[in-house]
Amino acid sequence: MYPIVEKKILSENVKQLVVKAPLVAKKVKPGQFIILRIDEKGERIPLTIADSDPTQGTVTIIFLEVGKTTKQLGTLNVGDTLENFAGPLGMPSEVKKYGTVVCVGGGVGIAPLYPIVKALKEAGNFVISILGAKSADLLLLEKEIHAFSDEFYIATDDGSKGHKGFVSDVLQQIIDKHKVDMVMAIGPIIMMKVVSNLTKKYNIKTLVSLNPIMVDGTGMCGGCRVSIDGKTKFACVDGPEFDGHKVDYENLTLRNRRFIHAEGDACKLAGV
Amino acid sequence: MSVRKTKYEMPEQSPQERIKNFKEVPLGYSKEIAIEEAKRCLQCKNKPCMKGCPVEIDIPGFINSIARGDFEKAAEVIKAKNNLPAISGRVCPYEEQCEGQCTLKKLGEPVGIGRLERFIADYERQKGKKPPKKPRTIGKKVAVVGSGPAGLTCAGDLARMGYAVTVFEALHDPGGVLMYGIPEFRLPKAIVKSEVDYIKSLGVEVSYDIVVGKTITVDELMKDYPAVFIGTGAGLPNWLNIPGENLDGVYSANEFLTRVNMMKAYKFPEYDTPVKIGRVVATFGAGNVAMDCARTSLRLGAEKSYILYRRTEAEMPARAEEIEHAKQEGVIFKLLTNPIRFIGDEKGILKEVEFLKMQLGEPDDSGRRRPVPIPSSEEKLAIDTALVAIGQSPNPLIPQTMKDLKIGKHGNIVTDDDGRTSIPGIFAGGDIATGAATVILAMGAGKRAARAIDEYLKKK
């Protein structure tokens, strides 16, 4: 059992939980994820890791309430426990000195970007961060990411903060000004696709973090398979980060909708 | 006195009834029938049946006890060698193992050794298992990675020798393939849990959510445990590698069965994990796992459940009993059929499979006649779900994280017959060493490795 030791409501449907999981906290590296199950009848869901504290033995997760499990997770409070919390899973981000890196985070994808920004900065890179959200109140970890960024930009769809428009507009301006050596993009599939299409024109190495549906998270079921350069890879063990220029985003979008009807039914029945 | 030539029948749920539920299909022998079946045993002096038993059970010994009505003694004889009889008594391919060697086969059918093992295991469980004698502790620790049949057997045997054993399991339930792979109607999960409880009663600790290679490495385990046994199984699904395999509606057998068995998707929405199969399901492959997929589909409400296989029934790797059960339940076999692509609609949802008809040619390396395509024989079949059950490869998580461990060309950990790997103190067995095989062979490997570990630690 894994107790929840801290809870923050970041926006109406984005919550942050700090979970006591000492073995995971000791091992976690930027870019990795965990799989949790709330209770005996729960589904196993993957969530990327926003932060960790090996001395306290805690792991921070930030999630958007989209389906039955995340909505139920959002109702839990400090003192409640999770039945299972396994990890850290997946391959860590390739953190090294690239030179100038641009870290692009969209929506709840900003959360897993944070440890990567931190690590890339500590590895000696010139870090430019661009955070995007629908509106200013949905931006996450602004201060935290700003603190580790040499340059820092915001884009909102409604213009309530920063540039009015998409993160890719800001990225275009940066590419026009700087020689960019690597782009790391985590966010909605459409954002990662647009960013990858842009950087491909300039031949800039681009990594994206994919979040397909998973079951076991250990390479056993293949439910999380993604098509990378025409080859089938498992996001749980080969990823979750892949070359953004080689991802088949259409297939990923399609596979993430596999259980959309069942998810709706489950939410209705559970009244969440 | 003449011996009855055929086994006593074991009652089963009727096919019409059982395709509507997930309850076990065979119902087991009664006491009276078990005694009669046991009396068929000739008690051969040379015990040929035992040569076919990977876990070395004194088969004539326990059958003799049953014939005398002493079921407790029979349980004791089995348990002396096999800690998981309720499992092997259900899923072991006896016809190729013990029963394949039985002298009675020359006259007719062998003694129903598997059925008798199952009877004793069930008798003991229903009566309440006798708590085992606490073994004398040696004060040495062993780590076992994976709680499938190999790991549980190795852990149980080591505990009985007095070692302090901890099993590290990646998932939230124990049992490995016994839990996620084999369906409830063939191996009820309550029985797996009860067998695991017995292993725990021997003093074995089981830790869940520990993905060895990620949460903790084998090298780290070696600091606390002078010996480590790796039994992580064949968890990596093989694919057909044909176009359209990533469409919505195509599952690996592992994903489909894990959702249904371990995550209990058949009880959705009481349980949160969904599964979606539509009206027509096609399973590719013809092993036991394929039969499990096809039969599970019927129980989930599929109107038609096909098995598509590129050879003929004679080459099917599944046990005869599983094929028979599938046929009784209405699974439709399309043989000499090789899929060439999956076709989806404009939304990317699976609609059809296209296949070529095959004919059998010359034998291949496996000794089975090689299927060759008949030119221009393309046909299509409208399906809602495709289940790919063409085998599994060893799980790569541990091999990936251990540079010095010798790995075979199929991704398996290389071991000798007793499970010794290229690194002293590290042992492996079951599917991770052999590639996908059977539960009983994994149990046998766990047993031999336990002896090798004991020998290694005694010298240390």
Image: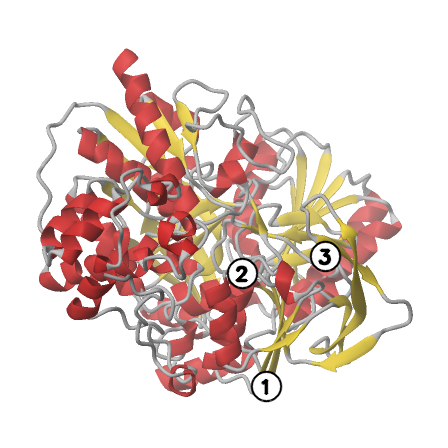
Q: Are marks 3 and 1 on the same chain?
A: no
Q: Secondary structure at mark 3?
A: strand
Is residue A187 in sight in this rendering?
no
Q: Name the residue nearer the viewer: B107 or A123.
A: B107
**Image: B41 above or below B347:** above
Q: Quadrant of the C terminus of chain B?
A: top left
Instruction: Estimate the x, y position of residue B301 in percent, counting from the top left.
Output: 49, 85
Badge 3: few (under 14), some or many (20 or more) residues near its Cα, within 10 Å?
some
Q: Which residue is mark 3?
A: A227
Task: Name the colouring of the figure.
Answer: secondary structure
Q: Which residue is mark 1?
A: B279
Mark 3 belongs to chain: A
Tell me the kind of residue under disc 2: Ala
**Residue in the image at 69% along x and 70% along y:** B335
How many marks do you count on the picture?
3
Q: Is residue B456 above or below residue B26?
A: above
Residue A202 image point, x, y percent: 87, 47
Q: CA distance from mark 2 to mark 3?
A: 31 Å
Tell me which amino acid carries mark 3: Ser
Looking at this view, is B22 or B322 the one in front? B322
Q: Position of residue B285 (x, y in %)?
A: 63, 63
Residue B51 appears left or right of A237: left
Q: Amino acid at mark 1?
A: Arg
Instruction: Read off the residue under disc 2.
Output: B318
Q: Who comes first in sequence, dot 2 or dot 1?
A: 1
* Label 2 packing within 10 angstroms: few (<14), some (14-19), many (20+): some
* Callout 2: SS: loop
Indicate the quadrant containing the N terminus of chain B: top left, top right, bottom left or bottom right. bottom left
Q: Are discs 2 and 1 located on one and the same chain?
A: yes
Q: Nearer the viewer, residue B91 or B192?
A: B91
Distance CA(mark 2)–CA(mark 1):
25 Å
Callout 2: chain: B
